[in-house]
Each structure stands twice: as structure tokens, then as C-alpha cells.
Amino acid sequence: MTQAARPLTYLIAALGGEGGGVLAEWIVECATRAGLPVQATSVPGVAQRTGATSYYIEVMSAPDPAGRAPIFALVPSAGRVDVAIASELLEAGRLLERGFVSPDRTLFIASTSRVYTTMEKMQMGDGRFDGDKVHAAAQALSRRYVSMDLDALAQANGTIVSAAMFGALAGAGAFPWPRELCEEVVRSGGRGAGPSLKGFAAAFAVAAHPPAAQTEAAPAPAAAEPLKTGADMAHLPQAVREVVAHGVARCIDYQDEAYGDLFLERVRTLVASAPALDDPRVAHALEEGARRLALWMAYEDIPRVADLKTRSARFERIRKDAEMQPGQILKVVEFMKPGADEIAAMLPARAGRWFMARADAAKYIPLLGKGINLSTTSVFGYWLMRGLAAMQRVRRSSLRYGEEQVAIELWLTAMRSALARAPDLAGALAELPRLLKGYGDTHLRGRTNYAAIFSRIVEPALASPAPSDHSAALRRAVAAALADPEGKTLSGALQGAA
Amino acid sequence: MAEVSFAKQIELLKLGAGETFHGEGILAVTKALLQSGVTYVGGYQGAPVSHLLDVMVEARDLMGELGVNVQACTNEASAAAMLGASIMYPVRGAVTWKSIVGTNVAADALSNLSSPGVMGGALIVVGEDYGEGASVIQERTHAFAMKSAMWLMDPRPNLPTIVRMVEKGFQLSEASNAPVIMELRIRACHLRGTFVASDNVRPRISGRDLQQQPADFLYDRLAHPPVTYRHEKLKYEVRMPAARQFIVDHGLNELFDGKHRNVGLVVQGGLYNTLIRALQEMGLADSYGETDVPILALNVVYPLVPDEIVRFATGRDAIVVIEEGQPEYIEHEVGTILRRADCNTTLHGKDVLPMVGEYTSEMLVAGLLKVFSRHMPQLDLSGAQAFAASVDGVRRDAAQALAGPLPPRPPGFCIGCPERPVFAALKLAERDVGKVHVSADIGCHALATFEPFSFGNSILGYGMSLASSAGVQGFSAKRPVAIMGDGGFWHNGLLSGVTSSLLNKGDQILVIMKNGYTSATGTQDVISTPTSASRQAAEGLSTTANELTIEKTLKGMGVQWMRTVHNYNVGSVRDTLLDAMKTPYGGLKVIIAEGECQLERQRRLRPIRAKKLAGGERVVRERYGVDEDTCTGDHSCIRLSGCPTLTVKPSSDPLKTDPVAHVTNGCVGCGLCGANAHAATLCPSFFRAEIVSNPTWFDRAKAGARRMLTRVG
């Protein structure tokens, strides 16, 4: 049996609503105009817009012999895909996982852009899949790997990703027909042809002449302001000094110079307890410790939120994110619903306690428990928020400030003890304040979890003769606290540790 | 049908003889119906056959010209019952739905149709929603064909064959007086190919050429005893032999001979292309279907023609039945045929191929290798063996490099979907009363079974949620909640659920998602769909609030406890749910959760907004946002939403390691983020940005004054 003629096979992985169907249609039309037999199939699934979908196309590289028609497959076969393209990096990974990319055959084009899945987004910490793994696998397992940010190319040219995908395919030499035919077919599509052609051309250029480094480097950290860390910290590792510098800046921005000095002083006590700075575990514990200390000291209370929401840089960012044009007018409405504890938190300690007592006794307090929609672009709303921001000046006498400083000192004491005796444990303990995030119920839950872990694991660990033995349990507990909001995993972990 | 245009597809339906049709499989079927002179068409939407009906409903002019009566039926039973017209009149009719679920619903009418049999051709086009991408339970239509003596076609998946089989299907139905089912798999429906069209045929009896006299009274055409006993004899003594004769006379099943005579392959037509690809992989076929191993492709899989099977098997060492799904009906029948003919050819099938799941060429290669190496040891199959090994190797390498499974990406609610807030409210209600039993249903709302909501203790079918909580309520301390869409309500839920609950005074809670359409299948109309005029007037606003057909129906039936809530008002939806859970009232409690399908709203709004912007008119766009300065990266907002535009991004704060929440520019400003922030006391990071394009002088003056009196613009 002769194997002379076999179809070229194309597999397109996209998300619903990205125009994958249009792309398949373009390819079919090109093949038809080039006189090549072609067939396309798809599994669009339900009408919903966000699931993974795929399109599969087979094209014969020569016209039919007289009286014969090819038998096309409807389903892609693992190991038998000539060209695979994914509009999104995780979907590229899925093609790899299913064996559709093979080293002897597949030209593989993948976008570096990510559309996170709900599973990744909903985690309490960082649930994102590591995209570098996909790049590495693609590099190793394809005949040729072309990687670019198709989504950015599409957006920059005012079109949707399918146009950029078409350009990338053509630019990488995936088609047995010339570029001009592709463009002719896009043009004959009518509406939106202009931007589509621009997106096509941009991706074509990148695929035809890939830049030397294909995977994008992580965005460089903002140009470090002069590192204000104090001369006595010059001997610290660079990473630690950077965090400390950011921490000082944060505390000054949050309160004043003196608060920055307090931060530095606290860091110094940590450094002083650390035995050997060349131990990477110690360096890590210091870096994370300084990071969590800064974030903790700059805790989000009402004055802080009011201040951040009325900065002009913030309005600039909103304009930029919304892609606003000159001449458009922006109005911003905030959704505020301060809880009793958040109001009490910013009051002077005694007033705050009186307020909480009233709230706990379920006495009526005007406005409490009602959502407030407040426009920070209105004159009234703006100055109301500035007024709240000004409460920052009396923050040091507030109820929450006192409570937070006590808790910070407790943690610092534990950190110092751990640094001196068990750098492993110190590294894990440095991460513990990560649980103190969010507002309202979320924050309350974080505090409860923090307290439970501190008393059930940290204190017994430090009291034990071999604190290092407890560092794994502490890490597990922190991870468990971030695993589910109901606290099921954490209570399991605490039981295991006890 | 709402805002989707089928203008291009309608043009394809008008093609004349000799013109080439370029398009999807399901549309080719639609065209073939018109070429067959069909008098009436009905059906119920569902992937992958929705298009057939959608396009026909839209092609009013063309249907009017031909006199074809098109009905968008309210469920599959009403579609199947339409075929009753062909029992007594020489008219051709076709109906369509998604199988197996639709066939289940239609089963009563189908039994009563096939018992008396038909005079005019009756064709049932089912989307065999099996395997990859299927959205329903995995069962085969084949069983229905066998039990009711309807013939089942499974054409080879290329447009010329599919079109020919539609035309032959009507003839087969008429020649044997039995209804014919054509099953089309998902990919065959969405297959984009070509065929040479014929002219449409205007039916002899139609809306334009009316039948002047009703049919005579003939008791033996009724599905009623005692004539049903005779029907049974007719089925097997007259109709089935006639069908077999027609199949042979018209060559409906196709023999592709090959040089290796000692083995033969019997394949469902729908799997033929996959089989050719598998043989190609083994070096036993080429791209044009030239095969070394003889193939009998069954375009009609029920009934089989015993002579055809025996002739194909005789003289061979073995035949293999390649049949997708379970149980292996065809293989059983082939086995019986061979035994009765005392033909001792070895029969293979599910012994070498997987019992369940869709067949890929890779699976067929694996199965056929076992048969070929045993019966054709002279063949060099090392290439195919190496292929199988190399594919396994690639998958293993990929799994290793990716270090663990990838996060799944199931479909989810659309951006701004009005059903999402109801589940956010239900999640918040559970904070108060604890977990409740949720009876889920079929429809968009079934997407709440995925993260971040994970709601649903059972799904019993379309419109069945309330009925399925009837048993649960009897032994549950807390009242169960049944979720139902307006699509499911009109399909079945009203009768199976509401009337039964009222009759039995059930202490149940029913939440009806009133979004105005059967959205999951492509926003087809229901009887409570807002009028076209009200939709045009509303532009981008929801139009379901003033459409009260459901409310009036329920009131008329005697529902005492009924509340209508506006979905995006999460706090009040939660409070209403809590009311329903806590009220002393012991009867059925209905909450109508109202909010028009966002897809429809956006389809309407987009062109209107574009026109206004181009014309220099004032347009306000709303979108939501998250301040990354104040976001602490806990993502509780996402756990209450799952909106595609509410996502995460790396924090630009060098101190924060966890990603922060972020709203992309795809946000349509539905309001859920703000409502959740209030209802769940989430966090102060959310804001709503209102962007005024083409501002008036008054807008500009206000903005100027604000700039002067504050420090920001």
C-alpha cells in the first residue's frame, strides 16, 4: 500500500469566544482557494464562553487524483499532529499532556499569555500553575517550538487572538500556501479585516524571525530607590537588603520616619539573633521575616485604605487599566462596608473598646452593617476619604495599633529564638504572618488560624529541645490554613501535629 | 430566536442543482431535508443539532416559499408526536434533538408512532452526544431503535454520504412503513466539508398545497388494542423484511474489498474514517480509503441484513465488529446471525476493543494489532507497534516534564451571567444555616456544580430538580433547594415538578432562573421570552423583570409563596433564600430569580453602543476594578464569583508574594463584584469606574469643578 499522500494535520487549542472557529474557517478557505482538499471539525461543547475547546483540520498537500477523494479523520491522533497551536499557555500544556506534540513531527506554537482557571484563581495563596514547566516541556518535546504573547499582539492591534494565531502559523511556515493567500482570505472576511490583518502581520513577523530569547523574562523589579537600610546592614545578602529597603519605605509611607526607624530597629534585632548569614536558610528566614514584618506593620486599616484610594496615581492606574481615551470622563464609586471591629480599630483604644462592647451587645449603631457606595471622584466623597485618611495621625493611640504591636513583638521574640536555634523553623515561622490577610470575616479567620498555629505548634516547638523537628509541621500547618476557607485541612493538620 | 444571525446559513439552504455547498454537517442535513421534499420539521434544541432548527426557524421566507411547517417544540415528546402526521398522510416529516436524553423524553410518542407505522417518510435526526465533549449521560440510541423497531442509520461522516443517507432514509421509511433514526456524532455535526447540492423539492402536500379532506377513520392505524398485536406482527414479518430488501437494493451498506481475504472488518458507518486512519497507521490503507483488509461499512446499523453479514463472513478466518459504546448490540446480532447460518468464522469485537468510550484510531490500532497478528502472522506490523510505543513515550515524557496534572478548565458562567449571583447568594445563605441539599438540573445553572460553587447533590434530568427533591424533603431536617432554569421549567419542570409538589403539598424550595431563554443551547425562545419590542427598547438593560408568564402560571396553579428577586442584588437574594428556608409556611416556596441572559444583552448592546459612539452621542460604560494596593491576595471575592474577568495577576508591590485580584477590561459591569463586596463584607478594594465617552458640556463642567475642588481629576 502506498503511503505517498497523507494529510497535513492541524490542531488548534483555544478557549470559548476567542475566535477559534473563525481561524479554522480561514484555514479551510485558504486550502479551498489553493485547490487542496480540506476538512475541519470541532468540539465547541456548550454555548458557554470559558471552557477549553479545540479545532482539528486536515489538508491534503496535493489536489485529488482523478475520481478519488481523501478519507479525512475527524479526531486528532496522538503523535500524528503536524502543527499544533494554543492561544493560552495552560492549554498548550494540555496538548503536550495528551501526546499531540511529538519531537519528530510537531511544529508547536504556544502563546505565553495566561488565562487562569478558576481552580488556580480561587486558592487563598498562590494557586497558579508554573508556566515555565510548559515552556520546558514544549522545548524538549516538539520538532520546533515558537513562543510569543499572542494575546498581547492581538490587543496591541485591536483584534482578537485568532488573527494573531493565523499570523503566527503563516510566519512559522505551517501552510503549503503563501502569506498573500492568507491575507486575501482575511480581507474578504469584511468587517474587522483591518485590525485582523495588523494582528496577523505582527504575529507573522515574530514567528518568521523569532527573537533570541523566546520565553519572557519576569518583569524587572522597579528601579530600587536608594537602599535605605542603614550602614550596619551593608553586610546582609542583597536580597535581604532589598526587602529591608522596601520595608522601610513602606513604613515611612504608612506612618512616618519614626515608624521606618522602628521597622529597622526590629530587623536589627532579628539580624543580631542570626548565627551565620552565609547559611542560606538564615538568609531566607531574614528575607521573609523582613517582608512579613513590613506588611504586618503596614496593616490595612480605614485610614490606610482611605489614603490609598485618594492618591492621584491610583486614578491614573484606573484610567490606564480601562484603556481610557483623552476626553473621556471618569467617575469612581467605592464599595465600603466597614465592620464594627474595623471602626473600633481606628478609634483611640478606650473608645474602641467601648464601641466594640456596644456592637457586641447588638446595640443600634447608625450606618453600621450597611454597604456604602461612595464616589471618590465627587467633592464630598473625596474629602470624606481624606478626612478618614487623616486619622492616620492618631493611629499610634488606636485600639488596633496597640494590639498589633503586641502581636508583632510576640512573633519577633519567637523569630529571634528560632533564628538562634533552628533556622529551618525560623524560615517557616517567617511565613506565618502570611495568614493575616483580608478584611472582615476573612481577616478574623486569618487571625484565628494564626493564633491556633502559634499556640499549638510554634510555642511547643520553641519549648522543645529540638525545635528544628517541628519546622515541617509548621510549614504543613501554614499550607493547610491556606488550603480551604472552611479550615478543614487546618484542623486536620493541627490534630496531626498535636 | 434572538440576536444571532443565520443569514449566511440560510443562503446555503437555497443552493440549486450542481452548486457546491461548503458548510457544517448539521446544515448539510438541513439542506438534504429540503431536497427530500419534507412537509414539516420539528425538534428541540441541544448540542450538536441546535443549528438545524435554529436556521430553519430563521429561514421563514424560504420555508414559506416551499410551504414547509417548522415548529420549535417545547420538548422532544412534542417533537416526536408531530411525526404522527406521517401515519395517515403521505407527507414527509423530520424531527431532531439531542440523544440519549431527548430520545428518552420522546420515547412514549416514538413507541406509539412505530407501532402503527408510517405512510409518509418519518426521519428522526439525533445528535448522538457520546464521548469527548458530550454533555449528557453515556448511553446509546441503538436500544430505542431495537425496542421500537425503528431503523437506525449511522452514515459515514462525509457530507455526500450524509446527504445521500437523509434522502435514502425517507425512502427507506416509506418502503418499510417504519420511522428511521439517523444518528450523527458531535464531530460529524460540526464537520465542515462540501457536497454538490440538488434543487429543493416543494412537497406535494404542504402549507401551500393543502390536504382538503382529513384521512379516513382507520382503527388499525391507532396504537390501541387489539390492533397493536397485529402491529407487532407487521413490524417483524412485513416491515423489517421490506427494510432489509431496500437496504440491499439501494446499496446502503458499503463493501470496500481488500486483498487480505481471511479477515474482514464490520464497522459502524460513523467510525469508518477513524478505521481508515488506523489501517493507514498499520500500512494497510491509503489516504483515499484504498484498503488491504476488506471492510463492510454499515450505514444502516439496525436492522442488519443477515445475508449481507453471512456473505461477508463466509470463507474468512475472522471478522471484527467495530462498534462504539456499550452494550455491543451489533456484535450480539452478528453473532446470532452467524450461529443461525452455522458460519464458524471467529467473531471479534469487544474482546479486543474497549467496551466503553469513544474510539480513536490509536485504540483501533491497539485492538486490530491483536487480531491481525493472530490471523495474519505474515504481516509486518512492527511500524504500528513502534507507533503505539512512541505515543506512550511522548505522553510519559510530557507528564514528567509538566510534573503533575494540569488544572482542569471546565466551562463556566459567562462574563456577567445573571445566574452566578444566585449561587453567590446561596453560598452566603449557607453561612447562616449550614449546608443544604441542592437538587441541580440541566441548563447553564448546572455550571454551578464546578468551582468555585460546587453546588448540587443530584442531577436527574432536564426539568427534574424539583421532582427529585420530593423524596429528599421527607427525611431531611432542612428543606432541600431545587434549582431550575426557565428552559427546564417549560420543558418538563412545570408538570413533573410543580404540579406534583402542589398535589402532594411538598415542603420544598424551588429557585427558577428566569433569564428569558434556553440559554445553554444557544438562547432559543421559550414562551416567557421577552418580546422583541421590549428587548429593542431596553438596549443593554435586563428585560425579564416585566415578563410575567411564569409568575402568572404559578399563581394560577395555586402557588402561595412566591417571591421575585433581582439576581444582581445578592444581599436580597440571600435574604429571600433564608426566608424560604425559615418560613413556617409548609407548602411549595418558589423564588423567581430574574435577570436576562447576559449574552443576549451584550449582543444587543454592542451594535447600539458602537453606533452611538460613532455618532458622537454620550455613552457611559461601567466596569469594576480592584485596587491592588489594598488587595491582600486572599481571593475570597473569586470564591464567590468565578467570573472570567475577575482574575489574578502578580502584585506589582515588591513585598507581596501572593497574586492580587484583578478585573480585566472584558468586564461588562454587571454589578456582582460590588454586590458581593457588600453582601459578604468582602473588602474595600472593589470600585466601579464609570467612563463617559462623548461627554456633554455639563459633564465637562462638573468634571472641571471636581478637579478644582479636589486634588485628582
Image: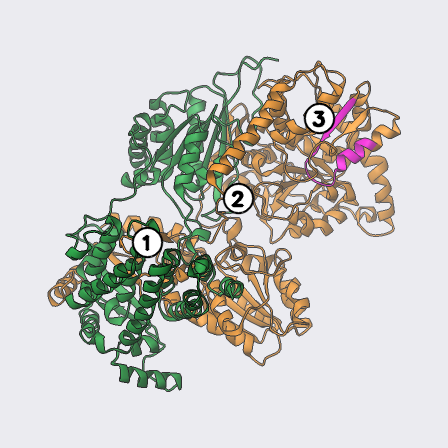
Chain colours: A green, B orange
Q: What is the C-alpha distance between the residues marked 2 and 1?
A: 52 Å
SS under mark 3: helix
The answer to whether any part of residue B287 appears in the image is yes
**Mark carried by residue A45:** 2
Highlighted magenta segment, given as a residue range: B318-335
Q: Which residue is mark 1?
A: A282
Q: Which of the two residues, B641 or A421, is positioned nearer the viewer here?
A: A421
Residue A244, horizontal then vertical, whole percent: 23, 57
Residue A347, horizontal then vertical, whole percent: 26, 79
SS under mark 1: helix
Q: Disc 2: which chain? A: A
Q: Disc 3: which chain? A: B
- Give the residue type that dot 3 points to: Lys
Q: Quadrant of the C terminus of chain B?
A: bottom left
How many numbered discs, if any? 3
Q: Which residue is mark 3?
A: B370
Q: Which of the two residues, A240 or B447, is positioned nearer the viewer here?
A: A240
Residue B265, horizontal then vertical, whole percent: 72, 24
Identify the residue at image location x=26%, y=50%.
Answer: A239
Give above or below for B382 relative to B403.
Answer: above
The answer to whether any part of residue B199 appears in the image is no
Residue B652, horizontal then vertical, whole percent: 27, 52
- Give the residue type that dot 2 points to: Gly
Q: Residues within 10 Å of mark 3 (few under 14, many from 20)?
A: few
| Quarter-of-image position of residue A93 | top left
Mark in the foreground, 2 or 1: 1
Q: Are discs 3 and 2 both within one chain?
A: no
| Quarter-of-image position of residue B296 | top right
Q: Disc 1: which chain? A: A
Q: What is the C-alpha distance between the residues marked 3 and 1?
A: 61 Å
Give above or below for B531 relative to B148.
Answer: below
Q: Is residue B641 left or right of residue A215?
A: right
